Amino acid sequence: MIKVVIADDENRICRLIQALVNWDKLGMQVVSTAFNGLEALRAVEKEKPDVLITDIRMPGYSGLELISRAKKLNPKLHIIIISGYAHFEYARQAIQYGVNEYLLKPIKKTALTDALEKIKIEIQDDYRAGMDLKGIEKDHKKDVTKLRGVFIQDLLNRPNMICSGKTLREQYHFMVQPGQFQAFCMKIDYKNGRPNPEAVSVITNKFIDTVVNRLKKYCYDYVIKNNNYMVYGIMNYAPKESENIRKILRDSLNQMDVQKGFMIGTAEISMGLGIAVHSSEEISKSFDTAIVAVEERLILGTGKLLDGFEKEPVLFEEKLLERYARNIGYALETLNRDAMEKEVDGLYHAVRENSRAHGWEILELVNSAASLFVMILDIKDKPEYLKAFRKACENCSKTEALFDSLKNFEKNFMDKIFAERESNSIRPVRLAQQYIQNHYQEPISLEEVSEKVGLSAAYFSVLFKREAGTGFAKYLMNVRMNEAKGLLRETNLPVSEICQRVGYHDIRYFTNTFKKIAGVKPVLFRKLYG
């Protein structure tokens, strides 16, 4: 596919150029649009297009300056100038810079299409002329490498995949021969935060180079794929080479373990070795047991070559998840964080007490517990949260770290719920206090205010006292008395009128209430403080 970048300071023109041409028919694709010369040059550098269509006058770099700089980045870049300036000088300069076509606005569909078709022919001719035998072999090798890598990815996506020798040879270019097949899995676990991806890439590539250089001597064929913090491998070799293969993997692991400190700091490296099988149809079994083996580092520790483990569940018999699901229901209903942590600790201790438990099923248990938790809470965006949690679990190298991750995962959600509940509790009380401040002159009641904030009178009464620190009636009385004090100090209004203004209609009741609060009657209060 021929890649095209369009640059014009008018968005309308960019859209018009995109709409005028049937790009698919031409075998072309617009990979970027830019609205000034700087953006256009960045697009040329990033997208590495075959064709640049640009206005001759733009902010940043002018069209001519853009062409000059773009040509330095890619001398083979094909360029079409579009301009509203029908001057020979612009055309002459553009031609000097190596412009293929010079079109005038308004842009005509036929003229633009003809120019692009002409460029397409030139590009195809250049491609054919430059494609020698060495280039063809190189591209073929890249395609074969990709297909071989797809074999590993398909094993990850389809755990029970069965492949005949013919399929392996024709579909994945894995040149199998009669003998043994065995999978391995190298895993990097990091501590104290995520390391730089480039550093991880260095150590995984170093491991692959080390293993590949030594496997060549003993294997009929092998395929190795790097996948983030994992390196997966499938080997085909003669049975007599079993010990040599094992020694190569163990030595490579030890070598990387020594060097890891220089490359990714506080990280641990482990390897799982699958069972050896004698048929290509059983490769998925070896692959599965390699992953099972590397998960045993959660129990046995990191830095080891682990093998001899098959996927035989043990913890399932104890029905730990069923018990956990029952108990967290109550903890979530009451929002009891201590009870929630106790249930996670209970799972952890049950796992520790079972000496036959496997690393892979501990990992599955923790992931299942997290899934149950979000399902019971009915959390939005569950898949995203669980995906992030599983990724965090994959980078735990100890059983204890797995359960700490589960505890933190659940605690974060509990804290959010507490914050939301707290917010939901404070808001109606704040609204009630605001209503009282605006209506204290009126004969308002708890029932009236609770209805205004949308709560039952009984629940509102308890909520108000908890949040405000005092009951509704006393809070209302304090608001009224504080207002009465202000009126007594700052005005000469009669006490009877102040009584009315602060929501009372019985002067005697007002006087007695005021004396309870202020310690003196209203008249004396005015004399002392007015």
Image (cartoon, rainbow, N blue to C red):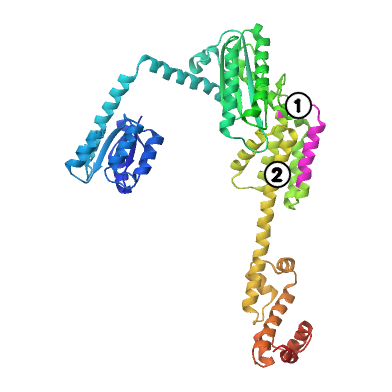
Q: Is mark 2 on a helix, strand or loop?
A: helix
Q: Give the range drawn in magenta.
A: 340-359
- Where in the figure is residue 422, as x and y percent of width and height? 68, 59
Q: In which quarter of the image is the N terminus?
A: top left
Residue 42 figure quarter? top left
Q: Residue furthest right?
A: 353
- Where in the figure is residue 123, as x and y percent of width and height? 29, 27
Residue 98 higher or lower than 304, as above or below: below
Q: Residue 408 carries which label?
A: 2
Residue 425 figure quarter? bottom right
Q: What residue type is labelled 2?
A: Asn
Q: Which amino acid does label 1 sit on?
A: Leu
Q: Name the residue under label 1.
A: 300
User: Gap between marks 2 and 1, in whole Å?
Assistant: 24 Å
- Can the viewer see residue 288 in this picture? no
Q: Does the magenta stretch include residue 349?
A: yes
Q: Does the magenta stretch include residue 475?
A: no
Q: Earlier in the sequence, mark 2 or mark 1?
A: 1
Residue 455 higher or lower than 66, as above or below: below
- Where in the figure is residue 319, as x and y percent of width and height? 77, 35
> Between 23 and 73, which is closer to the camera in this rendering?
73
Q: In which quarter of the image is the C terminus?
A: bottom right
